Amino acid sequence: MNELFVAESDQIAEGQRQFIEHEGQQIAVLRVQGELVAYLNICPHQGGPVCEGMLIHKVVDVLDADRCHQGMRFDENTLHIVCPWHGWEFNARTGVSAGAGNWKLRSFPVQEREGKIYVRIL
Ligand code: FES
């Protein structure tokens, strides 16, 4: 198991990300809703640089009592990262695909201690 230094804590603010290289691959560390997460920068769809994608709130349908569509709204509690190649969305906190729950970004444990951020490569 390797532990890699990523950045000083104050270098990754809320909604920001930092990329590190490990054995020829990129890993992104993001601070999302107060938590640090780390993902391999390879989309499980077709290998795009998913971690370079936009962070947006999940879009949800608004239905009335008869289940008729009344429009859409953003879910302010859930952030998605959107792969720049084909637009697949993944929950930024869990890495799980919004469209197909059995697809997931490869994640790594992140630790923040004494003002520094580290990723463990298992
Ligand atoms: S490679 Fe990411 S959506 Fe296709």
Image (spheres, rainbow, N blue to C red):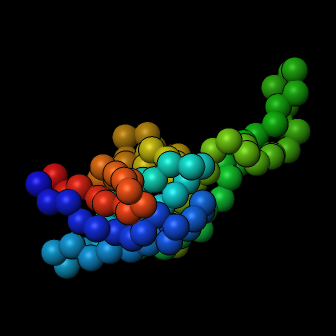
Q: Is residue 101 above or below residue 47?
A: above
Q: Position of residue 31 (x, y in %)?
A: 52, 58
Query: Relative to 116, is 77 on the left or the right?
Result: right
Tell me if 59 is positioned left or right of 83 in this view. Answer: right
In the depicted view, which residue is nearer to us: 57 or 38? 38
The residue located at (16%, 52%) in the rendering is 122
Res 50 → quadrant: bottom left
Residue at left offset 29%, top offset 59%:
119
Q: Position of residue 70 (x, y in %)?
A: 88, 39
Is 5 left or right of 60, judged from the image as shown? Answer: left
On the image, the x and y values in percent for residue 109 come to 30, 49
Q: Residue furthest left?
A: 1
Q: If the image is split into quadrants, where does the N terminus sit? A: bottom left
Which residue is rendered at x = 73% and y = 45% of the image?
Answer: 76
Vertical order, 14 against 71 (above or below): below
- Relative image position of residue 11 (x, y in whole percent): 50, 71
- Residue at position x 80%, y 46% from top? 73
Residue furthest to the top in view is: 65
